[in-house]
Amino acid sequence: MKKQFYVLLVLVAAFAAGLGSFLLLRPADGADGRTATPPAPAADARPVRENSHRLTDPAQSRLTVVEFLDFECESCGAFHPVMDRLKKEYGDRVTFVARYFPLPGHRNGQGAARAAEAAAQQGRFPEMHDKLFTTQAEWGEAREPKDAVFRGFARELGLDMARYDADVAAPGTTERIALDQRDGAGLKVQGTPTFFVDGVRVSPRGYEDFKAIIERRLAGS
């Protein structure tokens, strides 16, 4: 009986691991029920581009930290306070960049990215970025679309709502998000958050670990 119990545990664990891979790799079911096929990898994939969204813009940047993120990703949400602390500490020397990488299986990840990009069109990307993460527990993992919630955030930020609605629905917004996704796919990003420091992929475990990585790079080691 004990042996059967352990066999059952192994099978359950294997099923869970397989399900996780399936959710990551399968085409995404959007909040509207339609299937979205992930964009093909970019042939000239880059960690950062000229039009990438910068959360800090120091006069003399000595380092660039890039995060490929999904606003609905719980790990990204857990890392948000770490990134916020690092931005406050190093924002005068380090350029922090956020890039879209909504994951399959997150029904509102794409919608959140569209809200952020619409806010970016009015110069308010950093504010919407922070708002989406600090409220993630309120809308994340929902089965129904949360576009109305995101629209409420836009109103709270004082955005022009007619323009916001038009930008959320614009094909250019979809293409802008896909640009980041194509770069991420080309760089072998498979989950979020994924970080690059001056083009080198890193895997920090938390604030102290990330701080040490930044300090070493700033010191030139």
Image: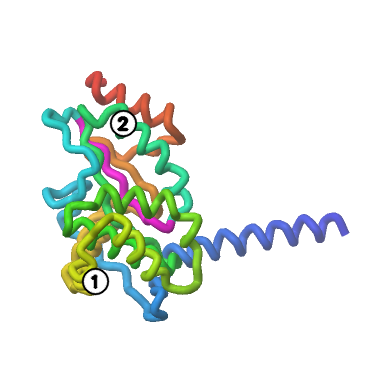
Quarter-of-image position of residue 72: bottom left
Q: Amino acid at mark 1?
A: Asp
Q: Position of residue 51 (x, y in %)?
A: 13, 52
Which disc, if any, is residue 88? Answer: 2
In this picture, residue 94 sits left or right of residue 31: left
Seen in the picture, residue 159 relative to 59 is either above or below; the reply is below
Q: Position of residue 82 (x, y in %)?
A: 41, 36
In percent of the image, x 62 and y 60: which residue is there?
14
- Residue 157 within the magenta-colored segment of the rendering: no
How busy is the neighbourhood of tag 2: few (under 14 within 10 Å), some, or many (20 plus)? few
| Span of residues in magenta | 63-72
On-image quarter of the C terminus:
top left
Secondary element at tag 2: helix
Which disc, if any, is residue 165? Answer: 1
Secondary element at tag 1: helix
How busy is the neighbourhood of tag 1: few (under 14 within 10 Å), some, or many (20 plus)? some
148 and 51: which one is in front? 148
Seen in the picture, residue 10 relative to 218 is either above or below; the reply is below
Tell me which secondary structure the magenta stretch mostly adopts: strand
Quarter-of-image position of residue 93: top left
On-image quarter of the N terminus:
bottom right
In percent of the image, x 67 and y 62: which residue is there?
12
17 and 155: which one is in front? 155
Closer to the eye: label 2 or 1: 1
